[in-house]
Image: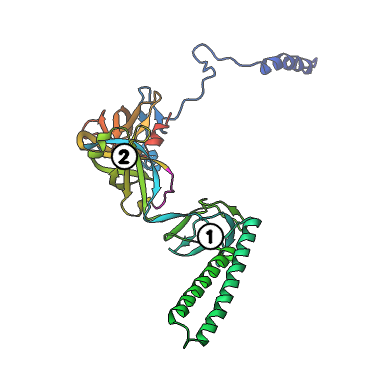
Amino acid sequence: MKKTNYKPRILMLALFALPLALAPAWAGPGHDHGDAPPAASSNGPQRQSDGSVFVPKPAQRQMSLRTLPAEPQALPRALTLNGKVLMDPNAGGKVQPMQAGRLEAGPRGLPSLGQAVRKGELLAYVVPAAGSLERSAQAAQLAELRAARALAEKRLARLKELADSVPRKEIEALESELSSLTERVAAVGGGLSGREALLAPASGVIAAAHAVAGQVVDARELVFEIVDPARLQVEALAFDAALAADVAQAHVAVGSAAVPLRLVGAARSLRDQALPLLFKGEGPGLAGLAVGQPLQVVVQTRSQVQGVALASAALQKNPANQPIVWVKTAAERFEPRVVTVQPLDGARVAVTQGLQAGERVVVQGAVLVNQIR
C-alpha cells in the first residue's frame, strides 16, 4: 500500500491561516460600540439630565449631608457695609518720642511683636541728638551756672558768719538765688546727658514695633503701637445717612461665627461721601482680628421681611452664576433651586424667594453636592 505524506499539506494550510489570524476582527452591524467610554455605574453619585443629582445613602453619610426644613418667618432687613477694625483709644496707644535721637534698649530689651506690656512699663530710651555747636553752647552755659553757684555759696557762708550785723532779708535772698542756680545746673546738665524714657501708655500687647537698637528716630515718629485685643472697635461706612437712626443690630463674621456688635455712635460729617458708623464688639469675639483688617459688617434694620433663614454654607452658585440651594425631593434625589437672598448676619442669609415651606434644604455638605457631575 502506498504511504501518503501529509506534512507538506499541513504546512501549506498553516501559511494560509496565519494572515487571517493576524487581521483585526470587525463587529457586525448593530454591535459596534465606537470610542464611547464605558457607562457610569448607577450606584455612585451622578448628575441627571434634568439637572438634579442622585446621591445614594452610603455616599450621603460619607459626605455628611444635613438638611433642615424651610420655615418662613419674619426676618429683619439687612445691609452689608464695608468696615475695618480699629483700636479702642481708651485701651491702647502709640509710643512716639518728643525729640529726635538714637534708640537704646530698656532693662528688658526692646519689646517684640505680641509681647504683653503693662501701663507705665519702660520700653526704650531715646538719647537726644544735638549738634556740636548746640552741645558746646550748653556746656558753656553749664560752666557759667556752676561758677555762679560756687560764688553764691561763698557769699552765703560769709553772710551767715556776719548774721548779727547783716539783715535777715539779704541772707534769704541769697539762699533763694543759690537754690535757683542749683536747679538750673541740674536742668542744663540733664539736657546734656539725659535720655527720654519711652513708656507704655496702656496695658495690652505690642501690635506694631519699628525699633532697632541704635536706630535714629525723628520727633513724633511711631516707634511702638499697643493694642488691647479684648477691646477692639469696628468702623463701617454707610452711604445712607438715615441708616444711623434705623440700626437694630449688627454682626460681623469671624470664621463661621457671627459676632454681635453694639452701635457706639455715628459721625456728623461725611468721609468720602459716606457716614462713618462706630461699633464695639460684644465679648472677646473680635480678639482674633488685627487692627486695620477689612471686613464686612451686616447691619440689621428695624423693618422686617418674610424669608427663610439658612446658613451661608447652604448657598451655592450654578453654571449661570445664580445663587442656588439644594433641596432634597426624595431619599436619594436632590434638586437645585434658584433663590433670591439677602444678608441676615455674618453667618446666615435670608432666602426671600425660591423656597416653599417644608422643603428640606441641604445646610451642610452643599458644596460637595454642587460639585457632582
Q: Position of residue 31 (x, y in %)?
A: 50, 15
Q: Nearer the viewer, residue 181 or 323?
A: 181
Task: Tell me the chief SS of the magenta region.
Answer: loop
Q: Is residue 355 left or right of residue 22?
A: left
Q: Is residue 144 left or right of residue 174?
A: right
Q: Which residues are magenta?
A: 287-293
**How far apart in space, not on screen, are marks 1 and 2 (Cα)?**
37 Å
Question: What's the amino acid at mark 2?
Answer: Val
Instruction: Name the spot of residue 276 as percent of width and height, x first.
Output: 33, 39
Which quadrant of the rendered structure holds the N terminus? top right
- Indicate the secondary structure of the residue bearing disc 1: loop
Q: Quadrant of the C terminus?
A: top left
Magenta stretch encompasses residue 292? yes
Out of 54 and 372, give the one closest to the viewer. 372
Mark 1 neighbour density, 10 Å: few (under 14) some (14–19) many (20 or more): some
Q: Earlier in the sequence, mark 1 or mark 2?
A: 1
Q: Is residue 138 left or right of residue 289?
A: right
The residue where tag 1 is placed is 111
